[in-house]
């Protein structure tokens, strides 16, 4: 049975990159005051192609919820129907949508987090950061990050494809706990930033953070031993008991990945090499 759809009207359109033909699209859902969703979720769009066949395509939402609005980041796909249909849509035009859908959302309780994205995979990361550091609406100026360290590693081929660059650079300048790392796989000679693939920039974060945690644990353990003698042994036994009993493990850091399958797999493999648990790695791939 077809899902019930709603009408979304395009209220604002901006070209993010002429070379990549990538557009930022802001929609308002008609007939409702609010269109609630969690940052990181996606909507499905529905339209009829030139052959009269109904087509459906999912797109990650590139914003945090705000009234009846949602935003998308879409680039043209050679020979494709839906992406080109949206890129050609004029302001005032409409599209049918249903949703929101998906579980690519921030895990609770919030932890230190590494966001990894390539291309239009930056869309849900923008939604995450808009929710963590809201600049508009009723929560403008609030800081929902709880002081957690947030890293965004964003990779593209060319500098012109660093979508929302001004926004993320401003965010990093205004919040000491937000770190924006960009890398290009096909940089021009004028590029003075990082070069290579996103997975290559995980190690400095993971290893530095792990070293700091081990140092802190060693200091704490030494202090406990001096005062309470065998307390450390008791704590270790308690942790082991929880693991055997099936109590859910708690993590103090997660990685959220969005992009093409090869990138997602490469990042997951790299984190596995660091000993990360699969539940620490949250991902969404779109090919």
Image: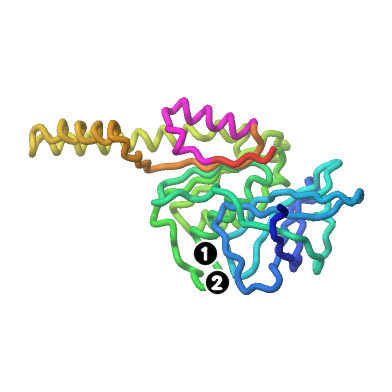
Main secondary structure along the magenta-highlighted residues: helix
Q: Circle 2: is it few (<14), some (14-19), or many (20+) Cα within 10 Å?
A: few
* Image location (x, y in percent) of residue 104: 55, 47
- Labelled disc at residue 174: none
Residue identified by numbered label 1: 134
| Magenta span | 262-282
Mark 1 and mark 2 in contact (Cβ < 8 Å)? Answer: yes
* Residue 92 part of the magenta-drawn span: no
Q: Nearer the viewer, residue 175 or 107?
A: 107
Q: Would residue 209 appear left or right of 214 to someone viewing this image?
A: right
Q: Nearer the viewer, residue 80 or 206?
A: 80
**Quadrant of the frame with the C terminus:** top right
**What residue is rendered at 60% in x and 52% in y?**
101
Q: Circle 1: is it few (<14), some (14-19), or many (20+) Cα within 10 Å?
A: some
**What residue is rendered at 80% in x and 66% in y?**
91
Is 104 drawn above or below residue 5 in the view shown?
A: above
Question: In the image as oriented, which residue stretches furthest toward the right?
Answer: 51
* Image location (x, y in percent) of residue 45: 73, 55
**What residue is rendered at 58% in x and 49% in y?**
102
Question: In the image as oriented, which residue stretches furthest toward the front?
Answer: 1
Q: Quadrant of residue 137?
A: bottom right
Q: Report if residue 22 is visible in the image.
A: yes
* Image location (x, y in percent) of residue 238: 20, 35
- Determine whether the residue tagged by mark 2 lies in a helix, strand or loop: loop
Q: Would residue 20 appear left or right of 223 to someone viewing this image?
A: right
Q: Report if residue 192 is visible in the image.
A: no
* Image location (x, y in percent) of residue 133: 50, 60
- Determine whether the residue tagged by mark 1 lies in a helix, strand or loop: loop
Task: For marks 2 and 1, give the CA distance.
Answer: 8 Å
* Residue 280 part of the magenta-drawn span: yes
- Labelled disc at residue 137: 2
């Amino acid at each position: 049975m077809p899902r019930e759809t709603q009408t979304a009207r395009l209220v604002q359109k901006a070209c993010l990159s002429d070379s990549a033909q990538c557009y930022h699209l802001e929609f308002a859902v008609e007939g409702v005051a609010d269109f609630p969703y969690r940052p990181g979720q996606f909507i499905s769009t529905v339209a009829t192609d030139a052959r009269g066949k109904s087509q459906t395509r999912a797109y990650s939402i590139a914003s945090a919820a705000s009234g009846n609005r949602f935003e998308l980041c879409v680039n043209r796909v050679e020979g494709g129907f839906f992406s080109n249909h949206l890129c050609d849509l004029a302001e005032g035009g409409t599209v049918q949508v249903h949703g929101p859908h998906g579980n690519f959302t921030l895990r609770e309780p919030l932890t230190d987090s590494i966001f990894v994205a390539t291309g239009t995979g930056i869309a849900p990361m923008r939604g995450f950061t808009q929710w963590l550091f809201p600049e508009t609406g009723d929560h403008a100026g609030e800081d929902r990050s709880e002081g957690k360290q947030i890293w965004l590693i964003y990779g593209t081929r060319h500098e012109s494809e660093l979508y929302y660059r001004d926004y993320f650079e401003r965010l990093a300048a205004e919040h000491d706990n937000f770190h924006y790392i960009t890398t290009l796989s096909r940089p021009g000679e004028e590029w003075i930033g990082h070069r290579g693939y996103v997975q290559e920039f995980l190690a400095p974060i993971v290893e530095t953070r792990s070293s700091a945690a081990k140092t802190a644990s060693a200091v704490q353990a030494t202090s406990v031993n001096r005062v309470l003698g065998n307390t450390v042994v008791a704590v270790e036994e308690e942790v082991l008991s929880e693991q055997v009993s099936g109590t859910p493990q708690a993590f103090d850091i997660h990685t959220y990945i969005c992009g093409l399958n090869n990138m997602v797999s490469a990042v997951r493999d790299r984190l596995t090499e660091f000993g990360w648990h699969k539940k620490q790695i949250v991902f969404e791939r779109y090919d």
